[in-house]
Amino acid sequence: MGPDPHASAETSLGEMHASIAVPAGAAWWRKLLAFVGPGGMVAVGYMDPGNWATDIAGGSQFGYALLSVVLLSNAMAIVLQALAARLGVGAGMDLAQACRARYPMPVNIALWLLCEIAIIACDLAEVIGTAIALKLLFAIPLFWGAALTAIDVVLVMLLMHRGFRALEAFVFALLALIFACFAVQMLLAAPSLHGVLAGFVPQARIARDPQALYLAIGILGATVMPHNLYLHSSIVQTRAYSRSAGGKREALKFAVTDSTVALMLALFINAAILILAAAVFHAHGRFDVAEIEQAYELLAPMLGVGAASLLFAVALLASGINSTVTATLAGQIVMEGFLHLRMPPWARRLLTRGIAIVPVLVVTALYGDHGTAKLLVLSQVLLSMQLPFAVIPLLRMVGDRKLMGELVSPRWLQALAWLIAAVIVVLNLKLLADTLSG
């Protein structure tokens, strides 16, 4: 199937590889704390501004009904991210490196291009979301707000210079701010508990209604991020755990615990956005709210609390900044893994950021302040279409005993993961057929 499966010219995320100490012989909770971090960085991608667009549209149009989709997609994310961590720990390679070692060059080039398209689609959502937040909070025009997001390259470099823990601390601080903003908004909105619980039960009408299905696939695309699988398989290796069989097993246990807990936080945020839209807009007959700016303008008057809109915009800004930081890192990992580019870290980040942000600036300049909600939802559907091209290689890698050794994925987990992959492919084919048929 190609060259030696363990062939890798360099370690993943070279300058940060195994840079965070894991205390040997310490209590389990101290070891767990050493592993806490990658899960939060991965969770960022599951609550980016693209999620806001799809969740607001879903909540205002269909009430609590699409909460079941949020729950299902989060469960899928937990399984897939656990497999990404398994690959990083078990094979000692990130997904891009593993693909390069296993597949012919034409296949790798195709996978790299598809992943770059996914990162651009993700960036479209993140940059527009950040630009909207800057406009709402500081009256900065949309285009210049989008241009300002390029500063995140400098931010990543400054934080990485201080060590990977500094980058993780920054991300966690913004996650805490987002959580606090939505906790307050949930209290203000006072949603129907019965409605929320009923919304978590799957409903047949989601599959029957083309608009509901379109939003459902958008939520799936917004939740399970293709580039997050590459990111997670790399950053779990920043821990200096023992590379023995026992050390790897312990590292995998802590890494999966970290990502699962962090993704439950992401579930709360995503559900909170949809619940807020359902409780405030849908419940009062406003089924047409689909844009972030609309939601911002209506929240304060409909809730009767001026701070509601401010909290919403602050959380949006924190979400956008966090997402662009992690997407920049993912872009570097993908380019290094597939292409083995030998460049200084700052140049690699600048290049990957440039590839992603230039199309975003062009689109923002063309569309201006109009149509951003449609662009956001469309970007998430595009992400969903890219998912199989990241998920299927991942499943093949973690099921390969030669590559994974003792940490090869057990049969029950492989079966579950392939079922998830099948659901993703079928939903995407359904979406494609509906789109082509108009």
Image (spheres, rainbow, N blue to C red):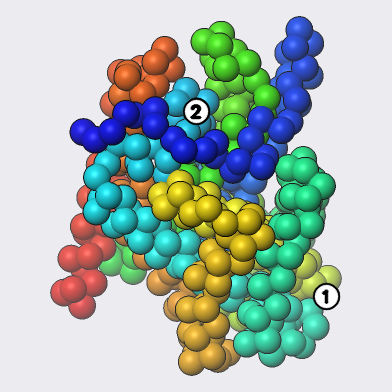
User: Can residue 381 be seen in this snapshot?
Assistant: no
Where residue 36 sits, quadrant-wise, is top right
Q: Please give the residue where the numbered disc 2 appears in the rendered image.
A: 92
Find residue 195 and report its horizontal and vertical position in percent: 54, 51
Where residue 7 sits, quadrant-wise, is top left
Q: Please give the residue where the numbered disc 1 appears in the rendered image.
A: 306
Element under label 2?
loop
Q: Assess disc 1: are there few (<14), some (14-19) or many (≥20) residues with their C-alpha within 10 Å of its C-alpha.
A: few
- What residue is rendered at 83% in x and 75% in y? 306
Tell me the kind of residue under disc 1: Gly
Q: Assess disc 2: are there few (<14), some (14-19) or many (≥20) residues with their C-alpha within 10 Å of its C-alpha.
A: many
Give the answer, above or below, for where 336 lies relative to 430: above
Task: Depth check: give the residue in front, 151 or 313.
Answer: 151
Task: Depth check: give the residue in front, 119 or 413.
Answer: 119
Tell me the kind of residue under disc 2: Gly
Element under label 1?
loop
- Which image quarter holds the N terminus? top left
- Which image quarter holds the C terminus? bottom left
Q: Earlier in the sequence, mark 1 or mark 2?
A: 2
Task: Depth check: give the residue in front, 140 or 347.
Answer: 347
